[in-house]
Amino acid sequence: MTDQATFDAVDAALIAVLQVDGRTPLTELARIVRLGTSATRSRLIRLEERAIITGYTATVPPAAAGFALHAVVRMKVHGSLFDQVNDVIQQEPQVVRCLRITGESCYSIEILAHDMTDLERITSRFSRIGSITTDLVYEVVTDRGTPVISRESTPNTTSRPCC
């Protein structure tokens, strides 16, 4: 478990910059938060060790990677079959997000597929576990991920100014 709510304004500023551009050089980060390079590096290491920063990634549009279809599968599962959902997800890397949800469905699963045959192959595995409804995505209107951290939106931050 992380102690995400216990970082100060300097940490929040570092996180906010990295959320916008994860390739910001260490010297630029240090300049922005008004710390030395060594102190900035130490803060980043602590944020990583505490799992507040969990990685740095490259974003590749699905179409550029050969995925022509984006689907949302809603699935209702009964009883002991819940354990099998995770098994299928672990075997299908094209499942990009799975949410266990309230309401009529138990899960909302996002899948990227090369074509209809590929999508059918994946969804048929889920249909053996529960009842499914599959919707194709026309357009991703917004995909923000985690909101950019700001001092104003950060819970339990100290009042120490950073910039």
Image: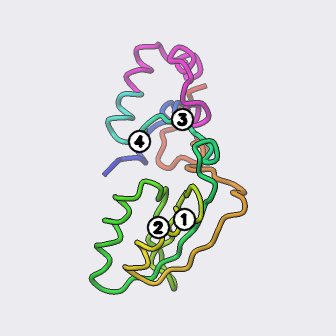
Task: Please state which of the two labelled residues, at mark 1 or mark 4, is closer to the viewer.
Answer: 1
Please tell me how crowded label 4 is: few (under 14), some (14-19), or many (20+) other residues with Cα within 10 Å: some
Please tell me how crowded label 1 is: few (under 14), some (14-19), or many (20+) other residues with Cα within 10 Å: few
Task: Report if the CB atoms under discs 1 and 2 are less than 8 Å apart.
Answer: yes
Please tell me how crowded label 3 is: few (under 14), some (14-19), or many (20+) other residues with Cα within 10 Å: few
Among numbered discs 1 and 4, the one appearing first in the sequence = 4
Please tell me how crowded label 2 is: few (under 14), some (14-19), or many (20+) other residues with Cα within 10 Å: few
Task: Please state which of the two labelled residues, at mark 3 or mark 4, is closer to the viewer.
Answer: 3
The residue type indicated by label 2 comes to Arg
Q: Which mark is residue 52?
A: 4
| Magenta stretch contains residue 29 | yes
Task: Please state which of the two labelled residues, at mark 2 or mark 4, is closer to the viewer.
Answer: 2
- Point 54% across, 30% down: residue: 22
| Magenta stretch contains residue 48 | no
Indicate the position of residue 129 as horizontal and vertical percent values: 37, 79
Q: Mark 3 points at which residue?
A: 58
Q: Which mark is residue 117?
A: 1
Query: In 3D space, how far apart are the residues under numbered discs 3 and 4 (Cα atoms)?
Result: 18 Å
Indicate the position of residue 29 as horizontal and vertical percent values: 54, 21
Query: In 3D space, how far apart are the residues under numbered discs 2 and 4 (Cα atoms)?
Result: 36 Å
Q: Residue 121 carries which label?
A: 2
- Point 51% across, 71% down: residue: 108
The residue type indicated by label 4 comes to Ile
Task: Report if the CB atoms under discs 1 and 4 are less than 8 Å apart.
Answer: no
